[in-house]
Image (cartoon, rainbow, N blue to C red):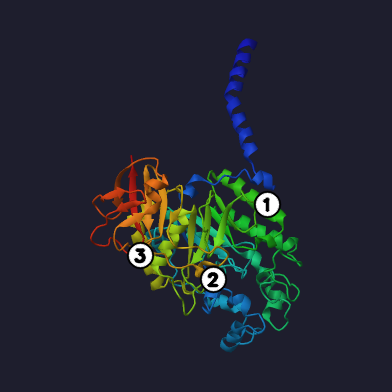
Amino acid sequence: MRYFLSLILFFTGLILLPSCEEKKEQQALTYQPEWESLKQYQVPEWYKDMKFGIYFHWGPYSVPAHETEWYSHFMYEKGNPIREYHEKTYGPLNEFGYKDFIPMFTAEHFDADDWAELFKKSGAQFAGPVAEHADGFAMWDSELTPWNAKNMGPKRDIVGEMGEAIRKQGMKFITTYHRHWLFAWYSTWDEKTDASNKKYASLYGPKVPEGSFVMAVPPTPPLPDADFNQEWLDRLDEIMNKYQPDMIWFDNKMDFIDEKYRKEFLAHYYNNAEKWGKEVVTFYKGHDLEKGTGVLDLERSRMSEKKDFPWLTDDSMDWKAWCHISDPDYKSTNRMIDFLVDVVSKNGAVLLNIPPTADGRIPQEVRDRLLEIGDWFKINGEAIYGTRTWTVYGEGPQEIVEGHLSENQNPEATAEDIRFTQKDNHLYAITLDWPKEDLFIRTLGKNQQLLNKDIQQINLLGYDQPLKFEVEDEGLRIQLPDQKVGAHAFSFRITLQ
């Protein structure tokens, strides 16, 4: 009997052994709130295939629709033209403060399924809302603050509804978070405004000395205390637990939050993702997180050269603002597509912001542009989705100015500006305008010696016949169709032997 018991225990041990090893492996992969541990993080392959996403600045600041999403800050700043406009339009700040816009933020036309369907038709692969801007108003059903969209204003769980609708369309779900800006966002020291009233402290944030603001580089005292830092973290944990976003994006100046809490956030998010059985992505700006613990994001700017790491840039469809304003200046579809192609050729992706109205509509001009981008993707998507960078990013006269908020300094592209991507056995050459004669690509000439395989065939996406071509010493010459094919950037599939 003992012999058989021994055999049973022996074989049971063999059966259990792999699961023990698996458990050890899982324990080894658990993230600790330390930078070295967090640098274990690997950017998921699914993200590297993502090239285009959409998000939206939408909140009580959409009600005045005046000049900027920073209205809630500038309305409390002495001498600012927006304060003068506010007091003339709505009255003194002790009678009508930012909180009084919340009941006017009605969102009665908001339809999450309609929005998500539009985003999908635009060609987006990921999408989502600003979960909380610098104004302190949570756009989700929060148990941590009464100042949320489920309790007030729309009386809808915007984050929850959008997450469900976006995933229904097969897209990844992103939420963005700007709460760290709340510290000193309002003039809480000014006794002549409602922001100083303790009754509203859970919206306007803690009292801070006059003159304090988060724009200092690097951050200077006074800095947020433990209570502010903990609430910043707690709200993120609540978003995670309720909605399990695939991506969490942070605005810049997150370095205003104590490093301890930033590390705790990453450990919470990455460990939760393992429990959820999925891979996730965190976006950060500047030096707000340690390199290698997330994906770097730029704002209204792009790289001038190709990078060996994946990156993101966020930009708004409106040149002037991120939220809906009464006099928008929308970018052309052509400009946005050229921007996207250039970014992708340099290992980046684009997160495009759109501005809904306070009553929950997406303006028709915005819809039209999104659908035009989608029409372009229907033809040219194979040159963008799932691609990787090539040996060089491109050629042409366009010189990109790098730097925060630098996009308005960059010139329009021309037909001589060509960008490259690659996938499988194809090299894609995308010209950012229609050439007047043949397309001549200098980078692919014999003298450059960059092609290690012969060209088998060249096709213009959207045109049903192969194109005639000749590889010359100085470049690759491609004979174009008699008529222009398409309206924006033009993709040539170069099939290699």
Question: Does residue 256 appear left or right of residue 410 in this picture?
Answer: right
Q: Residues within 10 Å of mark 2 (few under 14, many from 20)?
A: many
Mark 1 or mark 3, which is nearer to you? 3
**Disc 1 target residue:** 263
**Disc 2 target residue:** 59
**Precedes in sequence: disc 2 or disc 1:** 2
Q: Position of residue 363 (x, y in %)?
A: 41, 73
**Disc 3 target residue:** 372
Q: Residue at x 57, y 55 (%)?
A: 296
Q: Which of 260/352 is in front?
A: 352
Quadrant hosting residue 99: bottom right
**Precedes in sequence: disc 2 or disc 3:** 2
Classify the position of the N terminus by image quarter: top right
Quadrant hosting residue 253: bottom right
Amino acid marked by disc 2:
Gly
Q: Residue at x 71, y 76 (%)?
A: 188
Question: Does residue 128 appear left or right of residue 213 in this picture?
Answer: left
Q: Position of residue 376 (x, y in %)?
A: 35, 60
Question: Does residue 211 appear left or right of residue 397 in this picture?
Answer: right
Tags 2 and 1 touching, CB below 8 Å: no
